[in-house]
């Protein structure tokens, strides 16, 4: 998240993507990195959007986020939040179970999270968003590429030069800039590093079902 982006719009779209299906989506944004100059504004808008999310039974009117898959996921969320808190993180909203029935966990926003915290190194597969800051483009790339995963990444910037650089520098199978345009039938879907091999979707998905034949002839 770069300072030259449309911050309110980015915060709204990222919160919607993060808490879709309670964060139980393989391409859900996980670590949020925000440039210093935009950090406070982004956090303000992101937290406000998060607090407005109505959690509950998806069959009820107005509900925007449902439950986790099972009680094990509830326990996992509680452990991740507790670990982050123990290491100095701040919980700006959420951080706990909602109600005593079902597997509902509040949409959670963490700040001041150290890199040693589990949430900064593991896939939560749940509604927890850790937000950190960066000072330079290089710092952002180093952190983005630090983990051995590379399925999807998202970036917000108004700079064409920054967009082009991100396309080259971010180690990911998919990169969506200024929107969330992944997982379309006509586009390739897949990761790099420990996030998989090959692609689903698009013409690339057909390659595994084809046999490449090279024929050369000399007369």
Image: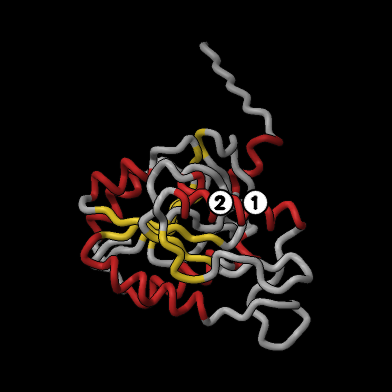
How many residues crowd mark 2 within 10 Å: few (<14), some (14–19), many (20+)? some
Residue 111 is left or right of residue 4, and the answer is right
Identify the residue at image location x=73%, y=52%: 72
Rounded to the nearest whole Å, what is the CA distance between mark 1 and mark 2?
6 Å
Secondary structure under tag 1 reads: helix
Quadrant of residue 2 within the rendered picture? bottom left
Identify the residue at image location x=75%, y=71%: 100
Q: Position of residue 48 (x, y in %)?
A: 44, 79
Q: Position of residue 60 (x, y in %)?
A: 75, 85
Query: Is residue 87 something that shows in the picture?
Result: yes
Q: Quadrant of the N terminus?
A: bottom left
Query: Is residue 185 something that shows in the picture?
Result: no
Q: How many marks?
A: 2
Residue 186 is left or right of residue 34, and the answer is right
How many residues crowd mark 1 within 10 Å: few (<14), some (14–19), many (20+)? some
Disc 2: which residue: 80
Contact check, label 1 and label 2, Cβ < 8 Å: yes
Number of the label disc, if any, that sits on residue 76: 1
Identify the residue at image location x=68%, y=53%: 75
Number of the label disc, if any, that sits on residue 118: none
Identify the residue at image location x=64%, y=58%: 24
């Amino acid at each position: 998240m770069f300072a030259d982006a449309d911050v309110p719009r980015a915060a709204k779209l990222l919160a919607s993507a993060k808490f879709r299906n309670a964060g139980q989506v393989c391409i859900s944004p996980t670590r949020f990195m925000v440039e210093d100059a935009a950090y406070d504004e982004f956090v303000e808008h992101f937290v406000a959007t998060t607090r407005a999310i109505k959690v509950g039974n998806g069959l009820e009117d107005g509900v925007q986020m449902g439950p986790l898959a099972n009680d094990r996921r509830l326990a996992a969320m509680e452990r991740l939040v507790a670990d982050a808190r123990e290491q100095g993180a701040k919980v700006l909203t959420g951080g706990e179970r909602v109600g005593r029935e079902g597997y509902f966990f509040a949409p959670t926003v963490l700040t001041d999270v150290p890199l040693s915290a589990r949430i900064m190194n593991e896939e939560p597969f749940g509604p927890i968003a850790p937000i950190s800051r960066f000072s330079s483009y290089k710092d952002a790339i180093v952190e983005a590429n630090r983990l051995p995963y590379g399925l999807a990444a998202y970036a917000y910037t108004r700079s064409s030069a920054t967009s082009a650089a991100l396309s080259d520098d971010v180690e990911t199978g998919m990169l969506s800039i200024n929107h969330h345009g992944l997982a379309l039938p006509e586009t390739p879907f897949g990761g790099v590093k420990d996030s998989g091999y090959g692609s689903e979707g698009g013409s690339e998905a057909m390659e595994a079902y084809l046999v490449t034949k090279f024929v050369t002839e000399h007369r």
